[in-house]
Amino acid sequence: MVLIQTGGRGLLAFLLVLLLSVTGLAATDAQIAEKTGLSPDLFLQLTVPVGGEELGIFIVYITDRTFNSRISPTLRNELSPYVGRNALYVNPSVKRVVDSFDFSLDRFTITQGETSFTPAREDWVEITPGFLDGRFVVNPAGPSYGSGSEGILVLGDRIDPERPFTVSYQGVSGTFDLSAPSAASVPQPPASPSPALEITPPPQVTDLTSVLTGGDFSPQAVAALLGIDQNLVGTLVITSRGEELRLLLIRLEAGVRNGLFGEDLLASIDPLIGTGAVMVWALSPTGAQFSPWRFYIQQGGTTYVFFSPSSFAALTPGFLDTKRVEPGTIAAGVIKLPKGVKRDAVFSVYYGTSKVDFAPLP
């Protein structure tokens, strides 16, 4: 788990630098996708030798799907006006702390089919002051993570996003193919139902999963179904590309012991009751992508992102490796409240850009 002040630079760049520093090697696309929540077709990473050291350039295509990642509110506000404009978020960085670097915008080339061009200076927008002239600033995680800069390249109608296009910097290139299915969209084995999730429902309810995926999914309705205080319950319905993901979040306080949960489930969660932990059930009436690594917590301007399996407790087999939930199945686990989060103050649990707020209990 890592703390990130939301008033700082972009979270995506921070995560990339963190991966590089932890592994000592270039992070793979799969690692970056898992840690940031970005679909692999939305980003490129270029490593360019410059003057005896490596310049890393992280590039993200800005679309609605970009905001389903663990992107900071500050960067989200910077990027959102550029959705639909064929724009790229560009983050050059180096491992040293420097005020400026030999990074020049006129070394970029965009190629699609037989057409190539070098973007003009007016096609660029600064996020970091001085980005246009190669100014770098220290990474918000601290000097040990190096320095970098951020900007936006607006391509407009000079490219067709339905066709592959290549971004090159000083001879090093990568290709965006936004029309191809990404690795994240490849169907995965469904999550397995677990006896630990059994409850004792009202007599009229014969199939809990069907009720949760097809019925009223409001916090009030679900709380009544489970026999617990609605202040302990939050629900999210997330739709994307014709798929619907439903997330049930239950704050584990003493009141859950009076609910309709089965003995096995209560035994599994009992050590976490009263700690501020949040139980999560993921379901879908259509089948949908889901990864527990896309959860994060915010409180008082600080974001807590999870990197360690110890931040979770699995309630269904393979919970932390889940990539997709299919109809009729539930993927379930518990998010442990990070140190530093005060359970007696409001905190928010995010999944991508959607959130549930948990207020202090009376």
Image (cartoon, grey):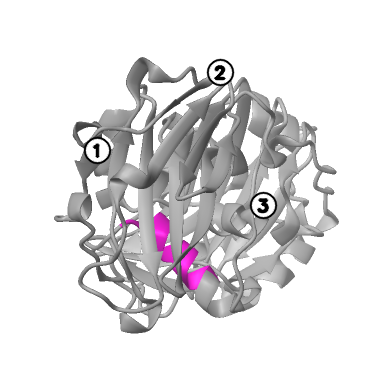
Q: Is residue 38 visible?
A: no
Task: Residue under label 1, please give it.
Answer: 124
Q: Earlier in the sequence, mark 2 or mark 1?
A: 1
31 above or below 159? below
Start and end of the magenta stretch? 10-19
Q: Quadrant of residue 124?
A: top left
Seen at 78% across and 40% down, the residue is 329
Between residues 356 and 2, which one lies in front from this camera angle?
A: 2
Say which quarter of the image contains residue 114. Answer: top right
Image position, residue 211 (x, y; %): 68, 30
Which of 203/95 is in front?
Answer: 95
Between the C-alphas of marks 1 and 3, the distance is 57 Å
> Which label belongs to residue 67?
none
Task: Please say whether residue 95 is visible from this viewpoint.
Answer: yes
**How many C-alpha atoms fall within 10 Å of the one at disc 2: few (<14), some, or many (≥20)?**
few
Label 2 sits on residue? 162
User: What residue occupies the far left of the structure in this picture?
Assistant: 129
| In the displayed structure image, the side of residue 88 where residue 236 appears, left or right | right
Instruction: Residue at 71% x, 41% y: name it.
Output: 183
Instruction: Identify the residue shown where x is 77% and y is 57%.
Output: 316
Instruction: Indicate the position of residue 29 as horizontal and vertical percent values.
Output: 63, 53
Q: Nearer the viewer, mark 3 or mark 2?
A: 2
Magenta stretch: residue 14 in it? yes
User: What separation in Å lies between label 3 and label 2 (alpha carbons)?
Assistant: 50 Å
Side (left or right) of 293 relative to 2: right
Q: For the residue labelled by badge 3, is the local secondary structure a helix, a strand or a loop?
A: loop
Q: Which residue is mark 3?
A: 260
